[in-house]
């Protein structure tokens, strides 16, 4: 009877430790600084640049969403870390045009096949729109 209790306690301890370790690793990964391979200043200039290419705008919004998790950017080559304030983050969002500009672009694509491709890319790859927004745009066509 004593061995059974020890085995149960050991198994519970191992399972609880694994769950706790998984939660901590997921938290660390999710909130770690966004890594950039160019310099931080070049990436900031990309985020601030006004570009008329709507596909590029979607890519920048995806990058902004990744940056907004921790509001930190880390240069892969030098190891430099830079933290951004709320004002700087708002400036990036405004320069990009925000989610509203992307949804407007996706709603106004005339070619249905191209629209479906762009919607799926924005929803499933870039994760800048939800599946509900995707369905809403497709149903309003």
Image (cartoon, rainbow, N blue to C red):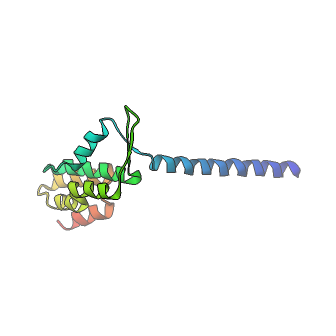
At horizontal 30% and vertical 48% (from top left) the residue drawn is 63
Quadrant for the C terminus in the image: bottom left
Query: 21 or 92, which lies in front?
Result: 92
At horizontal 35% and vertical 50% (from top left) the residue drawn is 67
Q: Left or right: 71 with respect to 52?
A: right
At horizontal 51% and vertical 51% (from top left) the residue drawn is 27
Residue 131 shows in the view? yes
| Mark count | 0
Query: 66 or 135, which lies in front?
Result: 66
Residue 96: give x, y in percent of width and height.
22, 54
Residue 126 shows in the view? no
Quarter of the image for residue 133 reads bottom left
Query: 75 or 112, which lies in front?
Result: 75
Residue 61: give x, y in percent of width and height.
27, 52
Which residue sits furthest left?
110
Which residue sits furthest right?
1
Which residue sits furthest top?
77
Q: Is residue 87 above or below residue 24?
A: below
Quarter of the image for residue 38 reads top left
Residue 12: give x, y in percent of width and height.
72, 52
Residue 78: give x, y in percent of width and height.
38, 32
Q: Left or right: 29 with respect to 96?
A: right
């Amino acid at each position: 009877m004593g061995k059974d209790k020890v085995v149960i306690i050991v198994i519970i301890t191992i399972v609880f430790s694994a769950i706790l370790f998984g939660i901590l690793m997921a938290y660390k990964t999710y909130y770690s600084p966004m890594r950039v391979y160019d310099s931080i200043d070049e990436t900031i200039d990309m985020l601030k640049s006004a570009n008329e290419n709507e596909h590029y705008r979607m890519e920048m919004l995806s990058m902004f969403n990744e940056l907004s998790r921790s509001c930190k950017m880390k240069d892969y080559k030098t190891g430099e870390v830079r933290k951004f304030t709320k004002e700087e983050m708002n400036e990036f969002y405004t320069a990009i045009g925000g989610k509203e500009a992307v949804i407007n672009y996706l709603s106004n694509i005339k070619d249905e096949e191209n629209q479906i491709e762009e919607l799926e890319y924005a929803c499933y790859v870039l994760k800048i729109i939800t599946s509900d927004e995707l369905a809403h745009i497709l149903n309003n066509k």
